[in-house]
Image: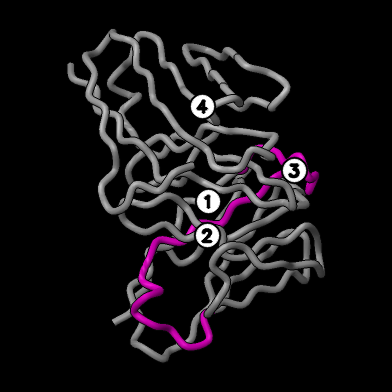
């Protein structure tokens, strides 16, 4: 994922709306991508993953889309809830047992 | 089932001091790793291990040592702490050490300040 420096990108959405969080990854050879959620004071928690032979995968209220042509990954959260407020990280596996994280996006959910 | 346990949760060091951050997992995971997280940045990989007796460097290994004498434990050592090592440190593990990787399970982190 891209580093965006000291300030996290922020997304603010109304409760009940859908959220879309985007991520650009760097290595065209990456074959496994993961989204993690990090709440304040906690470690990152797995949300959903996708392998490079797929372009879409759905979970409970979440969907991940992968566009290998432009090296872009997105996380869609349906009917966003206050409990979804957190920092979201995309991560890519570049092979060689290394998972590399993007800088993260902070999601605020307004009640 | 405790998962990944890190100790201590908070630590303050003076420049030049040494210390060990502890990490233990009770899930019989092959793969373990250490990340650091700085404000406004993602997690950066310090060191990782694919099994007992096997360790390797990540993106930012300088100033840190690791060892993996058992499957369960993966301590991170700072031999001579520097202010640049002020960060939040996370230990993570996954079931296997497959090159296609698997999702990581994270501990709750250690917040380290070096004065």
Q: Is residue B56 magenta?
A: no
The residue lying at 32 percent from left, 52 percent from top is: A5
- For label 4, the residue is A73
Label 3 vs 2, first from the N-terminus: 2
Dots 4, 3 in contact, CB < 8 A: no
Q: Is residue B103 magenta?
A: yes
**Which quadrant holds residue A77?**
top left
Residue highlighted by disc 3: B95
When the figure is inspected, residue A3 is found, relative to residue B73, above or below; the finding is above
Q: Is the residue under label 3 in contact with that under label 1 (CB below 8 Å)? A: no
Q: Nearer the viewer, residue A1 or B15?
A: A1
Locate residue B9, reporting x and y percent. 41, 62
Q: What stretch is highlighted in magenta?
A: B78-104
> Which image quarter is the N terminus of chain B in?
top right
Most extreme residue toward the bottom, as rendered?
Answer: B16
Secondary structure of the residue carrying tag 1 is loop
Q: Which residue is drawn at 57% across and 71% down?
A: B61
Residue A75's spot in the image, x, y percent? 46, 22
Classify mark 4: helix, strand or loop: strand
Q: Name the residue under label 2.
A: B6
Q: For the point 45% across and 38% down, which residue is it?
A: A89
Q: Which chain carries label 4?
A: A
Q: In this picture, is B100 found above or below A83?
A: below
Colouring scheme applied when the structure was drawn = one colour
């Amino acid at each position: 994922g891209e580093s965006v420096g000291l300030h996290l990108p922020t997304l603010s959405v109304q409760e009940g709306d859908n959220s879309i969080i985007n991520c650009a990854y760097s290595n065209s050879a990456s074959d496994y991508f993961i989204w993690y959620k990090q709440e304040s004071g906690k470690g990152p928690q797995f949300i959903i993953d996708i392998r490079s032979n797929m372009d879409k995968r759905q979970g409970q209220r979440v969907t991940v889309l992968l566009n290998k042509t432009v090296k872009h990954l997105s996380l869609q959260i349906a009917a966003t809830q206050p409990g979804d407020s957190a920092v979201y990280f995309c991560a890519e596996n570049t092979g060689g047992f290394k998972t590399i994280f993007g800088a993260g996006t902070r999601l605020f959910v307004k009640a | 089932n405790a998962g990944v346990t890190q100790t201590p949760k908070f630590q303050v060091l003076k420049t030049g001091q040494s210390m060990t951050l502890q990490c233990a997992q009770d899930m019989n995971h092959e793969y373990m790793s250490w990340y650091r997280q700085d404000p406004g940045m993602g997690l950066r990989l310090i060191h990782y291990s694919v099994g007992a007796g096997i360790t390797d460097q990540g993106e930012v290994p300088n100033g840190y040592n690791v060892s993996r004498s058992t499957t369960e434990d993966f301590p991170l050592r700072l031999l001579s702490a520097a202010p640049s090592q002020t960060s939040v440190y996370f230990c993570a593990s996954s079931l296997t050490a497959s090159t296609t990787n698997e999702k990581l399970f994270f501990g709750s982190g250690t917040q380290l300040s070096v004065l």
